[in-house]
Image: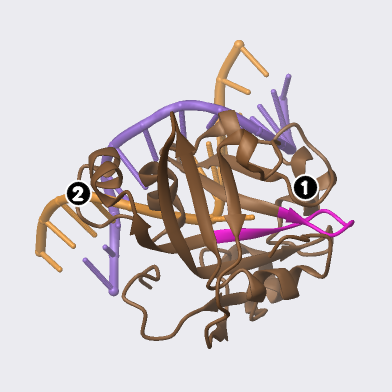
Chain colours: A brown, B orange, C purple
Amino acid sequence: MSNFNQPTLQVAQELLGDFLIREIRGKRLVGKIVETEAYIGMKDKACHASKGMTERNKPMFGPAGYWYVYFVYGNHFCLNIVTEKQPSAVLIRALEPIKGMEQMRKNRGRDDLCSGPGKLCQALKIDKSLNNLKACKKNGLWIEKGDNPPFVRAKRIGVDYAGRWADKKWRFYIPNSPFVSRH
DNA sequence: TTATGGATTAGCT
DNA sequence: GCTAATCCATAAA
């Protein structure tokens, strides 16, 4: 996946199997993307952009291919890649750790490394300093193409407040992977 | 200036 | 299965 300026559902599906690469002081942490969710436009009540542009969500109103990182529940960061023209993004929910597991384990303080949006941000040291930066090597966080695996689609998680939008099957993951988030 | 609640996680029953 | 923890962004006043 290199062009994020295309329909969000398509980006969310094509990202599965791609590699998320984090480079810190020359050291690389690598994970394969195994779970994503699409948040699409201002009508989608589950999407932060549905309330209009705010200080927090403004990266989604910018160009595709930029990171949208936000803080939730007083504890956790979530990593999204901005897509297409309308304010939309794909939430990266889980990774299969590929490289740099020792460092991830240090960052996390436990063996459960990347099986959730908050977990993978902690494992890869992703925080608001990356917010609204382009996904490229220069910024130390980018995506490289991998093989497209078979996947299934399901309802998004944690958005029950969004009414009928909560029923949209806009979550994609690799079935039977031990690395996807629980629930 | 104050109040509210969340795109979660960890720990416990 | 259930829920406390935790704090920033947002909305209300």
Determine which of the numbered discs, if any, sits on residue A175 in the image. none
From the top left corner, tell me how far across and down residue A23 is, in percent.
Answer: 48, 39
What quarter of the picture does the N terminus of chain A occupy?
Answer: bottom right
Q: What's under tag 1, amino acid-wise?
A: Met
Q: Is residue A52 visible?
A: no
Up-down relation of residue A109 to residue A37 (above or below): above
State the residue position of label 2.
A110
Q: Residue at x 64, y 81 (%)?
A: A169
Give the residue type at disc 2.
Arg
Residue A129 visible to the viewer? yes
Number of disc labels: 2
Q: Is A91 included in the stretch rendered in magenta?
A: yes
What residue is at 53 percent from the left and 72 percent from the top? A17
Q: Secondary structure at mark 1?
A: helix
Residue A170 vs residue A88: left or right?
A: left
Who is closer to the viewer here, C10 or A175?
A175
Q: Is residue A69 magenta?
A: no
Is there one chain holding both mark 2 and mark 1?
A: yes
Magenta residues, start to end: A82-92
* Mark with earlier residue (2, 1): 1
Q: Is residue A163 above or below residue A91?
A: below
The chain carrying label 2 is A
Name the residue that disc number 1 marks.
Answer: A60
- Element at badge 2? loop
Q: Chain of mark 1?
A: A
Measured from the top left, where is residue A183 in percent x and y? 38, 73
The overriding secondary structure of the stretch rendered in magenta is: strand
Q: Most extreme residue toward the front, as rendered? A: A26
Q: Residue furthest right?
A: A85
Question: How far apart, in angstroms, are the residues tagged by discs 2 and 1?
Answer: 32 Å
Circle 1 packing at 10 Å, graded few (<14), some (14-19), many (20+), is many
